[in-house]
Image (cartoon, rainbow, N blue to C red):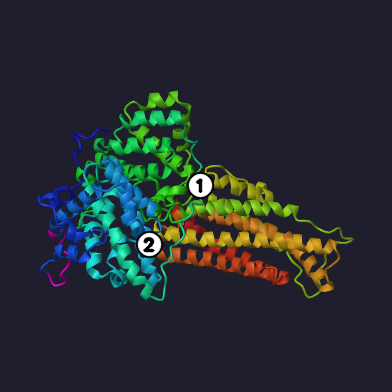
Amino acid sequence: MATLEPINTCLSVQVHHMVCSLGLEKVDSADLERIVTVSGQVCWEAITPYLRTLDTEDQGLNYVESVRLLGPVCKSVHSHLLSLSTKQFRDQYGLWFRWTDNTELFVEVFEAIRSSQHTATALSLMKLTACLERALGDVFLIIDKDCPFLLRDLLASQELATVFGQSVMNVLRVFLGSPRSLNLRNILWHGFAAPSEIPPMYTSMLLLLTAGLGQILKGAVPHRTSTLLHRPYFKLTQLEELAVFPDINEEAIAVAEDFVGKSDFVVKIMLPYWREALAAYRNQRYADCVIFLLPQLEMGLRNLFTTVNNCPNRLLTAESTTLYTTFDEEILWDLLNHQEGPRIRDHLSHGELDLNAFPKEMASHVVALAVVLLHHCCREGNGVATENECLRTIIGSTHSYCSRFHPIGRLKQQLRRCVGSLQKWDEIPKPTLGQPPERSGSDHSGPTAQTGCLMDKLVSNLINRLQPVYNEELSLSQHLLTEAQLHLVTKLLAGHTCTLYCPRATLEAVALLRKIASQCLTVSEQIMSSAASRHQQWLSKSLRSRQRQNYLRMLGSIQYLHPVFSLLTLLITVELLNVQITSKNASSECHCYLKFLKSLLQYTENMATYTSPDKNKWAESWDLTEKLLLKVKNFYSKWYNVITDCAT
């Protein structure tokens, strides 16, 4: 999979000129004493005049001229910081980073600048931009409650301009705010910039500007009624669900390091990032490892995409008019994109995670994914993999992988919980009675033989509905009992279901099925909880006469609701497997299908109310259930032929 020509840069011509050359054109440095005082005060009034605007009606920023003129300023600031020791930097500027709630990170950035190591400077710049964005969002929330998700929108907001001043925000926008600017955050976090391509003077400048913002803020916040509060860090709670791969051990790291030099997945100019990522993992710097790797996974996937599809231009940096390949077009959806997944790059790049408490499990997962991709494009990978047990396990783990965080994957997990809950109904304690529970004369007599026939018919409909999507032949007689239906649900959920590129109609149907499953689980859990509580009261003889009668009605209801909710769980599962076929039907048919699902949802919501501890409407629950069963029968009778025709 080797590319035809070596890649010297992943920045387009225009972006490369903007980032790597434009700010260095002027040889002279700016007068440092005008930019920052001896005591460390940032003189914004000496910086903002270097900004230029366009000769247009809106007088937007002229990013090219602004970068060119700010270049000497950045150079002077960089020289100034290099002249300081860590203690001097901390003494002079440490106070002004407190507004970010992460002073030590900025000290770490300063030390990286002094080290003159390109990878360390790039890593620090990614951390700086993430932390700065988070801190600016906290300031935004002093004024408004809905903080913009994108950094460029945050920097362009009127709220921040009110606090810091529009000219100050314009300075920041030159460095971070637009695809037409230096756009330092995006070209790093999306994997476009090689380690040596971003001049370290820009990191120095952003470091000083962040301190300058703290100085402005000290004067601005005391005059406001609201105080600056810092949002808590996001907690990664999905680590157990991500436990797909074995832990990365030293042997696996060593083989991965070998792969890095042999895999076409790695763009050669990005090799230092890969080596630093694996070294960071070995040294237990797990956040650094992942920050290094995520942009390179994206770059590697983009490289793979452009090579396979013969479109090398798409490897280059996006400009404002250019579409470029990101994770939105590629794989790793569970880790990066699905809303209920960890969305690890989003949370990292927006400063939402505590880097000092970054979990090893997440880093191990990302490294394992990197190993799989490296091996996939490695010219000598197959021989190595067969010799290394850990790598065999890692690579083999991807073969049976099913999405955990796509809405379909989440629905499958909900259904498994429903099955587990319904299977526990047999353990519901019951009192020893001299006679079976009786209903009062005003109650409905409960299920009849006709109801039993209706339930059998619905099971038959569901088995027929499975034929287009399930290879095994199923016998109706073997699936009439509740236990067999729940076993079938478990078996059906174990199969692979395609989740990529689901159309909107499919996702809408899945969303309804998820709500139905959620209500089913609520009903099941409520019934078990109420039954256990009432049984204890029965044993202690603390139930009043009316409560005893209600308890007996509950026990009778359990007998008929168990098969109904088991059948409903099977129905949801069957519809899940058919949902992509059904959603391709004509709009009118699809509308009727969604209407049917909404009626199921209405039933389960009502049942969740009726079975709640404060309601206990057991007689009404059967009336509602009987109507639901008839509605399901009518739906399948009316639409079954249409749906099956579309499936075939």
**Mark 1: which amino acid?**
Leu
Residue 61 seen from this side: yes
Say whether disc 2 or disc 1 marks the residue closer to the N-terminus: 2
Q: Magenta segment: does it hold 356? A: no
The residue beneath circle 1 is 239
Residue lying at the far front of the rendered structure: 38
Q: In the image, which disc is placed on residue 380? A: none
Image quadrant in which the N terminus is located: top left
Whole-percent x, y for residue 508 in the image? 45, 62
Drawn side of residue 622 relative to residue 272, left or right: right
Name which residue lies at 36% across and 59% down. Answer: 95
Of labels 2 and 1, the one closer to you = 2
Drawn side of residue 206 relative to residue 515, left or right: left
Whole-percent x, y for residue 287 in the image? 41, 45
Residue 481 seen from this side: no
Q: Which residues are magenta?
A: 56-65
Q: Where 415 sits versus 545, above or below? A: above
Dot 2: within a 10 Å radius of its alpha carbon, few (fewer than 14), some, or many (20 or more) residues? many
